[in-house]
Image (cartoon, grey):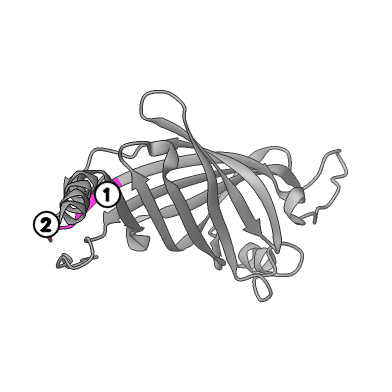
Amino acid sequence: MKTSMKSAVALFFALPSLALASNWKVDDSHSSAGFSVRHMMVSNVTGSFNVKSGTVNLDDKDITKSKVEAVLDAATVNTGNAKRDAHLKAPDFFDTAKFPEITFKSTKVQKAGQGKLKVTGDLTMHGVTKPVVLDVTGPSKESKDPWGNTRTGVTATTKLNRKDFGLAYNQALETGGVAVGEEVTVNLDLSLVKQADAGAPAATDKK
C-alpha cells in the first residue's frame, strides 16, 4: 500500500513536467522556404521551394532540448522562369528525379539572445548530408486562429556553399567570374500548429 501511494505521488508531481513538452506541425500552406544566389556577378536571383512537411518538439522548460525536422519538395523549385527552373531540376543542379526531397534534422539547439536561437542540424540535399547552423528568431507568442488552433511561428536563415552538396555546375564569363555564385542564402518562414495531446480532441486544421 505504501509503495502504491509513493508511486501515485511521484506520478502526480511528474505530470506538470511532462506537459512542458509540446508538439507542433508545420502548416505547409502558410510556410515558405526561399533562397538567393548571385547571378552573372551583378545581381541576385531568388527562388523558393514548397514546404512538404515538418515537426517541432518544443521543450518549454529547456528550449535547448527541443527538436526540429523539415522536408522540402525539391521538384517545386521556382525562380519565376520556366526554362531556368527546368535546368535547376535537371542533373546539373538538384537532379530532382533522383533526389526529390531536401531534409533537415536538428542535432543541437542553443540560445543566442532574447528570442534568438542557433539550431544546428544535418541538411541533406542532392544526396549529400552536411551540418548547417540556422539563425532562428522565435518561437513567436502563441495565438488562437478562428478555428481553435494554437499557432506560433519561427523564421530562420543560413548561408551555405552549394558546391558542398555536389551542385558544382557553372559557366565562366568572358569578363571574368562565373555565371552562378557558390554562396546561397536560405530563408525559412514557418507557421506552426500545436498538436493535441493524446486523447484530446484536435481542432479543425483550416487552410
Q: Earlier in the sequence, mark 1 or mark 2?
A: 1
Q: Are marks 1 and 2 in contact (CB under 8 Å)?
A: no
Horizontal side, residue 76 vs residue 124: left or right: left
Which residue carries the number 2 mark?
146
The residue drawn where x is 65% and y is 62% is 84
Q: Position of residue 147 (x, y in %)?
A: 12, 61
Q: Which residues are magenta?
A: 146-152
Judge whether residue 203 is colored magenta: no
Q: Position of residue 141 (x, y in %)?
A: 24, 38
Residue count near mark 1 (Cα–Cα under 10 Å), binned few <14, some 14–19, many ≥20: few
Q: Secondary structure at mark 1?
A: helix
Q: Residue furthest top?
A: 113
Using the image, determine if residue 46 lies above or below residue 199: above
Instruction: Write the residue at 70% across / 69% down.
Output: 95
Please determine whether, in this image, residue 168 is positioned above or below residue 137. Answer: below
> From the viewer's perspective, is residue 203 above or below residue 170?
below
User: In the image, what residue type sits under mark 1?
Assistant: Leu
Between 2 and 25, the one nearer to me in the picture: 2
In the rendered structure, which amino acid carries the disc numbered 2? Pro
**Residue occupying image coordinates x 56% and y 59%:** 103
Q: Nearer the viewer, mark 1 or mark 2?
A: 1
Dot 2, how many residues are within 10 Å of its Cα: few (below 14), some (14-19), or many (20+)?
Answer: few
Residue 72 placement (x, y as % from top left) = 51, 62
Q: Separation of disc 1 and disc 2 at Cα? A: 28 Å
- Per the rendering, the mark at residue 18 is 1
Rendered residue at 66%/43% (across/down): 160
At which x and y percent is residue 7? 22, 52
Q: Nearer the viewer, residue 188 or 40?
A: 188
The N terminus sits in image quarter: bottom left
Image quarter in which the C terminus is found: bottom left
